[in-house]
Image (spheres, rainbow, N blue to C red):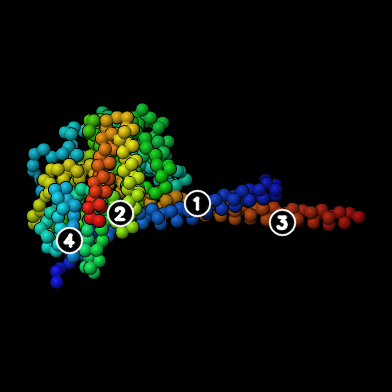
Amino acid sequence: MAQSFAFELVSPEKLVLSEQAMQVVVPGTEGYFTVMANHAAVVAMIKPGVVEITLESGDEKRMLVRGGFADVSPDGLTLLTEYVSDLANFDLEELEQQIKNAGEDVSDAQTDEKREKAQLLLNQLEEAKAAINRSN
Amino acid sequence: MPSLKDLKNRISSVKATQKITKAMQMVAAAKLRRAQSAAEEARPYCERMAGVLSNISSAMDGREGVSPLIAGTGSDKVHLLVVATAERGLCGGFNSSIAKMAREKARELKAEGKEYKFFMVGKKGVDALKMEFSNQMVEKVDFREVKNIEFANAESVGSRILEMFDNGEFDVCTLFYSEFKNIMTQIPTAQQLIPAQAPEKTDDQGSDTFYEYEPDEEEILGELLPRNISVQVFRALLENGASEQGARMSAMDNATRNAGEMIDSLTLSYNRQRQAQITKELIEIISGAEAL
């Protein structure tokens, strides 16, 4: 039987998840990678996408994240992310709405700077949507 | 000597005030619980962030081209003072102690011949400092409409600070807020944001573990540092939120007690006067009867 390790998912607002996990798939900026027990120590940036977690109990969880950091240390894996939502009760329509809003922001933006910002958000959201579609 | 009627009016007005302060105290107590748990829930993120940051910066130690967010711009000519206060008053010395601390710092800088600018977060701080420094206030943000501070609020402040830093509008940034110790004590605190003070190194681990970085350290650090600013602002806002409610609770508790004391002493003199009047009327009747 494979070993489990400590997994924590933290957002600025709260500690979202802190459990023993068997395996976690992390969307790194340079490609997805899977963390299992005794993984080499890595600090990696994550891109918007879906984190797939297999808990010790065998349950699987899928969480949508929008960028952040993964810190793999000998003690376990910590994911730091600003925005996170559980895909189990996720509303795809809401994401669509956000994408639509972001798209409008891009076209309405007065300055280049604002447009860039809105574009960045739009890209993030679209990537997230693509990630959901892929994993469905 | 006030008449009986005056005294009666005084008593009822103080009683009304006491009811208000009592209600405010209870509202503050309820809000405090929420603010406190929000501050506690944000703690893990800050701790982990500090951990990652100290890991990377120790890996970066002694290298060239460290980000100016850590190394500074090389001068300390222009200071940005970010003053975070509450939106409402009636919370004891909470707002004024933060404002006082910022004011002292500004005067100190002035005496040293340095430039300073204010970034005001919260309305009360603006009120307290505008007499002296209205020309130095470059930015004002208030969260009056925001019920619960969210990370996005802090991010908007953080990104504005970074924007100003990138434009070279200041060299050193200091954040003023009030740290929540417990309900009775809130400590006004000044924290230097830029250049970041090196996080305390944890000796127990990390130093002997070899970390891999993906992408490389510089790129991660470049992402991490700006985010760290927002996280620090967020933490300060949450601490402030809890402090404000704590301060208001104890201030209102005091006010309620004072009102109680006042009611007691007013009631006492009201009763004395009533008695004196009765005695006086009795004497009048008796002496009237005797005269017959």
Label 1 sits on residue:
B24
Query: Which residue: 37% across, 35% down?
Result: B140
Which residue is farthest right? B292
Question: As rendered, which of B40 and B112 lies closer to the eye?
Answer: B40
Disc 2: host chain: A
In front: mark 4 or mark 3? Answer: 4
Label 3 sits on residue:
B275
Labels 2 and 4 share a subunit: yes
Mark 4 burial class by Cα count in 10 Å: few <14, some 14-19, many 20+ = many
For the residue marked with disc 3, what is the amino acid? Gln
Label 4 sits on residue:
A76
Q: What is the CA distance from the residue labelled 4 to the residue labelled 3?
A: 79 Å
Q: Is residue B129 above or below residue A71?
A: above
Instruction: Determine if residue B80 is in view.
Output: no
Q: Residue B251: where, in percent of width, then height?
A: 46, 50
Disc 1: host chain: B
For the residue marked with disc 1, what is the amino acid? Met
Q: Secondary structure at mark 3?
A: helix
Labels 4 and 3 share a subunit: no
Query: Which residue: 67% across, 56% down?
Result: B271
Q: Secondary structure at mark 4?
A: strand
Q: Which mark is residue A85?
A: 2
Q: Residue B181: where, in percent of width, then height?
A: 34, 54
Q: What is the CA distance from the residue labelled 4 to the residue labelled 1?
A: 46 Å
In front: mark 1 or mark 2? Answer: 2
Instruction: Determine if residue B124 is in view.
Output: yes
Q: What is the CA distance from the residue labelled 2 to the residue labelled 3?
A: 72 Å
In front: mark 1 or mark 3? Answer: 1
